[in-house]
Amino acid sequence: MKTIHIEKYVDGVPQEVLSLPIAPIRMLAGLLPAEARWRLQQHGLDLDLLLEDTPNVPAQWLEVEEGAVAKRIRISRTD
């Protein structure tokens, strides 16, 4: 089963890991307004690429800040 893996890192150390099946994410992504997709793209997350049926999709990284703590989020897909 194809899955999306989301990993949160603080100072290079993994803090949380979440794996979700891709089918429901595809359905929900289709409901996102164009502006939301555009804003995600501006932050480094290409949903269309991540959810396509192409092999070997590279991992994508987001830089976020929670409170005053800088964190990196790695989003990848497993086929």
Image (cartoon, rainbow, N blue to C red):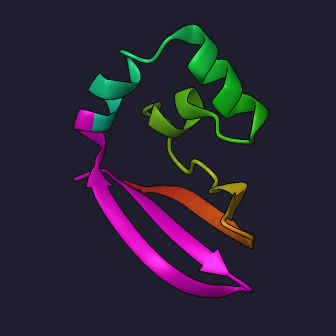
In-image side of 22 versus 9 (left or right): left
In-image side of 46 versus 25 (left or right): right
Q: Nearer the viewer, residue 44 or 76?
A: 44
Quadrant housing residue 61: bottom right
Residue beneath the point at 64% across and 53% down: 58
Q: Nearer the viewer, residue 64 or 60?
A: 64
In-image side of 74 versus 63 (left or right): left
Residue beneath the point at 24% across and 36% down: 23
Q: Residue 44 in the image: state x and y as whole percent.
A: 74, 42
Q: Residue 22 in the image: state x and y as whole percent.
A: 30, 43
- Main SS of residues in magenta: strand
Tally of numbered tags = 0
Residue beneath the point at 68% across and 20% down: 38
Quadrant containing the C terminus in the rendered view: bottom left
Residue 74 is a magenta residue: no
Q: Which residues are magenta?
A: 1-24
Residue beneath the point at 30% across and 50% down: 2
Quadrant housing residue 67: bottom right
> Is 36 placed above or below 54 here?
above
Q: Residue 19 in the image: state x and y as whole percent.
A: 32, 63
> Is 70 placed above or below 60 here?
below
Quadrant housing residue 78: bottom left
> Is 6 placed above or below 70 here?
above
Residue 7 is a magenta residue: yes
Residue sitting at the far front: 67
